Every structure is written in structure tokens, then in C-alpha cells.
Image: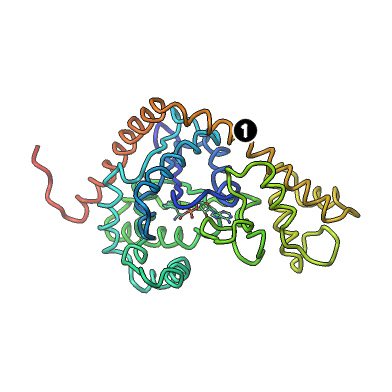
Amino acid sequence: MIDNKKVLFSGMQATGELTLGNYLGALKNWVTLCDEYECFYSVVDMHSITVRQDPAELRKRARNLLTLYIAAGLDPEKNCLYYQSHVSAHAELAWILNCYAYMGELNRMTQFKDKAAKHTENINTGLYTYPVLMAADILLYQADVVPVGKDQMQHLELCRDVAQRFNGIYGDVFTIPEGYLGKVGAKIMSLQDPERKMSKSDENANASIYLMDDPDTIMRKCKRAVTDSLGCVSYGEEQPGIRNLLDIYCACNGKSTEEAVKEFDGKGYGEFKMAVGESVVTVLKPIQERFTQLSTDKAYIDQIIKNNAEKANYYAQKTLRKVQKKVGFPERIR
Ligand code: TYM
């Protein structure tokens, strides 16, 4: 608890262009939840280097991502928006937690298996212990709730297990966090292969809608989205493409699936896809405009980065000191 409010933590990697999946699965919920909780939203640049990055590009993307957090509606005066690499306690706690996480647990992580298969030339130890750093992120702020997309739930379970193990040995050190999944949009699928999730790293640009795509591109991608030959808009298992478009549509405009299915009863896929595209444009346009405007104000963004890193450090250090004491590190002499 901070000032009688429960704590929320979440983060995003500054790798690749952000997709509509990142927005509907995470960022959009962050904005909805931000008044209720004391929030920490990190740009997790330390996670990003588990895959090779161009340094200048990473720096630029990290700044753009932080700016995008604000453009999407997170008030930087109320929410702590910061770079993970500016708070060294993340790395320090991750080391300690590494000594409490089992290899057997990490071996089960599907994201590690996927990424290892994709980057066979660079299966580094950071990629393997990635979920432990993620646990450190969350536990440092004693987070009660962690809003993420479905793909991160396995990592969150691991975080809970490690925290419970640690608490079992040393007493109630960590708050055990709960995952938060949005009602709709927790897993947005690729527009070209609706059996796979929409991903920043997809090589096919038509598979994902990027947050910075212009309206024409969004409409074109929706029109080209893979569907089926059944010819009716319904939410059935056998229509993964249509189901995904319905999820996107409903997540963008707040309608229920039943309402949407009714709305397109008897209508063709062409008309439905146009409506999906328009709903996405309506959501993204104001964010893009605000992003462009904010990007010109260097001094403002710099100030936010500085102030929020101080705030994050303050809370992170509190937990880290407590943990260091528990595991038996010698006290500092002041
Ligand atoms: P990342 O950067 O891959 O994704 C950021 C957020 O977007 C969600 N997401 C999706 N949601 C719905 N549909 C999709 N197709 C989709 N693709 C991505 C993710 O679930 C995530 O919530 N390891 C994390 C970042 C992280 C983190 C943390 C998150 C590091 N530390 C601590 C929460 C708490 C990641 O790589 O997310």
C-alpha cells in the first residue's frame, strides 16, 4: 500500500513497433485502472537486451514508448513512468531471486522456448532468467495487481511462486501479486494467421496493426485480414479470424460480443472489416496526435524521466534493503 492505495505494476519492452495487441491487451487497461491504484509503469529496457538490439535504436524506442504511455492517457504526475535501467535495484533483486527460482521452473517457460527456437545463435542466460527479472520488477514495488496480456500469465505465476517461497522462508516480505486480464482483448491474434498472437516481431507487416499506422494502412490491413468462407459474422471456434476481428472491434468501442454479432447479422465480411478498421482508427488517431505533439517537448519529457526515476528508486530501495537484510547481507555503516 502507498498512501492507502493498492499498488499496480506493469511494463512493456521497447523492442519493435508497438502493436494493437499491446494496446488492447495492456496499455488500454493501464489507463482504465490508473485512478484506482498507485501505479508504476516501466519501460523495461533491461529485458530488451536479451535479444540483440541496435543501441541508438533501443534508446530512441525507449523514449518513444515512454512518450506513448503519456499519449495514451497516463498522467505522469500521478503515475510513475520510468526506465527500468534507471533503477539499479531491479538488477540487484533479480540476482537475489535467481537464488530462489529453480531451473525446473524456468525450463517450463513457453516464451523462453519460443525465443530460444527463434534466436538459435544467441540463447543467452538473460533470456533464460528473464522471468526472474520480471518477478523482481513486480515484487520491488510490492505490487498487488499486474495488468498484462494472456501471454505473460505464465511469468506472473512464476513470480507468485518465487515470492511465496521467499515469504515461506523469511516471513511476509513480498506482497503476492494478482494478474489482471481485460475482459476482451487479452489475446489479440495475427491478422494473417489467427492461430498465432499478434506480435511486434512478426516479419509480415500485414499481420499486425502498429500503433503508429496511418488510417489508410489500418483500413488496408483490416480489409486483408484472413477470415474464412462461412460468410457469417459469429463468435465460433471454427472462425478464428472473425472472432479476432470481433475482439478487436469490441475492445475498441466497448460493445459486447453479442451486440456486435447482432449488428452484423446478415451483413458481409467487407462491411464488417470496414467497421473494424474504423473503430481502430477512432481509438488510435487521438493517441497518435498527442504523441506527435508531446515528442516536440524535449524538456517536459526529460523532467518526467528524471522525477519519476527518483520516485521509483525511492520505493524500490525500500524493498531491496528489507530483502538484503532478510537474506543476511551485512548492514551498511552510515
Ligand atoms: P511485451 O513488451 O511483450 O508486451 C507488453 C504487454 O502487451 C501484452 N501483449 C498482448 N496482449 C494482447 N494481445 C497480444 N497479441 C499481445 N502482445 C503483447 C503483453 O501481455 C504485455 O502485457 N515481459 C513483458 C514485459 C514486462 C512486464 C514486467 C510485464 C517486464 N517486466 C512486469 C508486467 C510486469 C513483455 O515482454 O511484454
Q: Is residue 102 left or right of residue 254?
A: left
Residue 71 placement (x, y as % from top left): 53, 34
For image coordinates 40% across by 31% down, the residue present is 3
For image coordinates 33% across by 51% down, the residue present is 172
Which sits in the foreground, 107 or 322? Answer: 107
Count of marks, rendered view: 1
Which sits in the foreground, 169 or 82? Answer: 82
Q: Secondary structure at mark 1?
A: helix
* Position of the C terminus by quadrant: top left
Which sits in the foreground, 116 or 6? Answer: 116
Task: Name which quarter of the figure residue 1 lies in.
Answer: top left
- Tag 1: residue type? Pro
For image coordinates 70% across by 57% down, the residue present is 244
Task: Name which quarter of the figure residue 299 lies in.
Answer: top left
Residue 182 placement (x, y as % from top left): 60, 49
Q: Is residue 11 left or right of residue 270?
A: left
Few, some or many C-alpha atoms within 10 Å of disc 1 (few <14, some 14-19, many ≥20)? few
* Residue at the disc numbered 1: 286
Q: Can you name the residue that lies furthest to the left here?
A: 333
Residue 324 placement (x, y as % from top left): 21, 51
Q: Is residue 201 left or right of residue 103?
A: right
